[in-house]
Amino acid sequence: MGEVELNKYKFLQNIDSPTDLRKISQNELPTVCNEVREFMIDTITRTGGHFGAGLGIVELTVAMHYVFNTPDDKLIFDVGHQGYPHKIITGRRDKLQTIRQKDGLSGFLKPSESEYDAFGAGHASTSISAALGMATARDLSKKDYKVVAIIGDGAMTGGLAFEAMNNAGVQKRDLIVILNDNNVSIDPNVSAFSNYFNELFASSLVNSFRDNVWEMTGKHGELGDRLRKIAAKIEDGVKAIVTPGVLFEALGFKYFGPINGNNINKLVKMLKLIKDIKGPVFLHVMTQKGKGYAPAERDSHYLHAIGKIDKNTGNPLQLLKDKIPLYQTVFGESMLEFCKKDEKLVAVTAAMCEGTGLDVLQKEMPERLFDVGIAEGHAVTFSAGLASQGVKPVVAIYSTFLQRAYDHIIHDCALQKLHVVFAIDRAGVVGADGPTHHGVFDLVYLRSIPNMIVMAPKNEQELKDMLYSALYVYTNSCSAIRYPRGKGLGVELREARPMELGKSETISKGTDIAVIAIGKTVVEAVRAKEQLQNEGISVELVNGRFIKPLDSEMLDDLASRFDLIVTIEDGQAMGGFGTAVLEYINTSEYQCKVEILGIPDKFVEHGTQEELYKILGLDTEGIVNKIKNLLDREPVLEEKKLKKF
Ligand SMILES: Cc1ncc(C[n+]2csc(CCOP(=O)(O)OP(=O)(O)O)c2C)c(N)n1
C-alpha cells in the first residue's frame, strides 16, 4: 500500500507518545482528534481492520491519555478492537499500516507490543475484572496510580463484567469504569441493559445538573466539601425516582453521565473532575460508532471490521470473484431449511448473528433465533434449558468464544444427557485476528467430555449432513460440529443425508503409509496424496469425520496393515484427534506408530490463514515434506520394532 502522508498532520506528526500529546494546549485537542481520526481512516481503508469502534472512541482515547499519566496510570480497554487510536498516540502511528499482518501490529491490545497496553484482550467483558485486580495489586504494594477500565455497551452484556462490578462495589478501591455506549455491539445490541442505557441517556439533564454541582462545589475547598455532602443528601432523597445510573450506584459506584463522548472538551473536563474521586466511579459516555466517516456512520455494522475499501465510497476494493459459499452461510441456510420443516428447532447465538450465518434465519423466522448478547455461558445453559423441555437448540458460537462456556457444556448439557447441538464456527487458525481468536483448542476440550459427539466436516455438504445427523439421528447426546473460517470447497449442495455415527470415509487405498485427516485438513491431505503419488509414494487416505467416537473398525484395519499412521488436524496436537488415535492404537498390540500433525504447544501469532498453515506445516507442501521425512526414517522404525518384539 502507499504511504500515509504524515506531514499533513500538524500535531500528529509530532506525537510519538502521550507525553507529546500532554504538551499540547487543550484548545488544540479538537484538531488533534480530527487528525487521529483522519489518519486512522487514511490507513485502515487501505489495510483493512477493525474500524467503526476505533472511530467512535477517538475523543475518549485522546482525553484519557491527556488527563491520565499513562503508562503509569493504567488504561484497560475491553476487547481491544477499538484500540487503534490508542495505538496511534502511543508510539505505533508509523506501524499502523502493518496491523493484523504477519509480523505487524496486533489488531488487539498486547502488553508485549507496548507498555501502554496494560492488559491483553481480544475476548469481551474482561476489562473490569482485570482493572480491579490491578487496583488491588496497586493497593497491596502501596503504589499510587489510577486504573481505568473502558468497556462497550456490548461487552457490558457479558456476565463477567457484572461479576466484576459486583466485587468492585464491595472492595471499594479507587477504580474508574468508563462505559463507552454506542448502542451497538457488532450486530445491534440486544439486551435489557441496552434498553436501560437508552433510558439513561434520555435523562441526561438530571446528570448535567449533578455534574455542575460537583464542579461548582469543588471550587470552594472545605465549604465545597460540605456543600457536596448536602447536595449528595438531597440527591439521595430523589435519586430513586429520577437519577439515572441507580443500578450502578446500587452496585457501589458513583455514577456520572451520560455525557457526549465525542466532545473532547467535555470529556477532558469530566475526567479531570472524577480522576481523584475515592472509591469506584462509573462514567457513562455516549459515542457514535463510525464517527467522522460517513459510510461507517450510516452502517456501523457493515464497517465494524473491514477489508481494503475505497475511502470515498466505503465499498470493498476486492469483490468476491466466485460464488463459493462460506461455511457460515451453508450453516445458516441449512438451519433455515431445517427450521421450516421442524417447529421444535431453534438457534441460539451470543451476539454473532451475522458472523455465524444466522442472519438469514433471523430475517425469515425471527421467532426461532435467540440472540442472548455476548454471553456464551448463558447461551449454552439457556440451550440446555430449552432442550430439557423438548425444544431442539443449535447453539452457534465461534470456537474461541466457546472456551468461555466450558463448565456450561459439561455441567448443564452433557452431564444431563441433553440433546444440545453445538455449531462451532471459526475452528482452526483464523488468520488476522491472531492468538486470541484461533479456534484451536476445541477438539482437546470437547473430546474428554462424556455424552459428547465431536465431528469435523471436510466440506460444506458434510457440514449439512452432520448438522442433520446431530439433530435427527444422534438424539441421545450432545453433538459438536466444528468447521473453519472462510469458504467451503464449492461442492454442489444436495439434501442432507444421515451419517452413520463414528464412520469415517476412506478416500483412497494405498500401501506405503496411512493418513487420517479431519476437517479443513482433508483437502490439503488429498493434494498431498496426489503429489506423493506422482513421486511414487502410495498413500491410504481417510477422512476421519469423527473425533469422537472414533471409527475403531477403520483404525483396527489401518493398524494391522501399516507401520505408520499419520494424523492431521487443524488444532492443538496435544490432546486432540491424533492423541485419540494414539490412545486407541496403544490399547492393543499393534506395532503401528502414530505421528501427529497439528499445532505445537505454543500460541500461534497473526497472519493470513495461508501463511499460518504454511508455517505450521499443515499446508500441502508441509504434509508432503513430513510424510517424505517419515518414510525416510522407516529403517529406524524397523530397527526399533525388532528390538521391542
Ligand atoms: C467473549 C466474546 N464474544 C464475542 C466477541 C466478538 N465481538 C467482538 S467485538 C464485539 C462487540 C462489542 O461491542 P461493544 O462492547 O459495544 O463495542 P463496540 O464495538 O460497539 O465499540 C463482539 C460481540 C468477543 N470479542 N468476545
Image (spheres, rainbow, N blue to C red):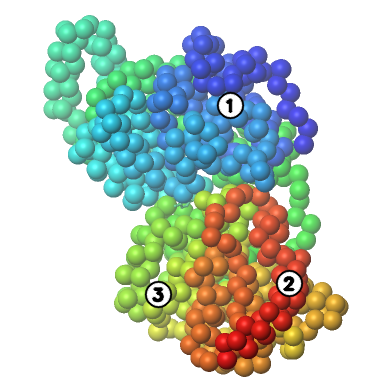
Secondary structure at badge 2 equals helix
Residue 168, quarter of the rendered image: top left
Query: Foreground: 316 or 418?
Result: 418
Q: Is residue 365 left or right of residue 255?
A: right
Q: Circle 2 sits on which residue?
A: 629
* Residue visible at 34% across and 36% down in the picture: 134
**Tags 1 and 3 touching, CB below 8 Å:** no
Q: Quadrant of the N terminus?
A: top right
Secondary structure at badge 3 equals loop
Query: Foreground: 210 or 91?
Result: 91
What's the mark number on residue 91? 1
The answer to which of marks 1 and 2 sits earlier in the sequence is 1
* Residue 630, image x, y percentages: 70, 75
* Residue 216, image x, y percentages: 27, 10
* Residue 141, image x, y percentages: 28, 31
- Residue 416, visible in the rendered structure: yes
Residue 429, quarter of the rendered image: bottom right
Q: Is residue 457 above or below residue 140?
A: below
* Residue visible at 34% across and 65% down in the picture: 407
Q: Circle 3 sits on which residue?
A: 449
State the CA–CA distance, disc 1 to disc 3.
Answer: 46 Å
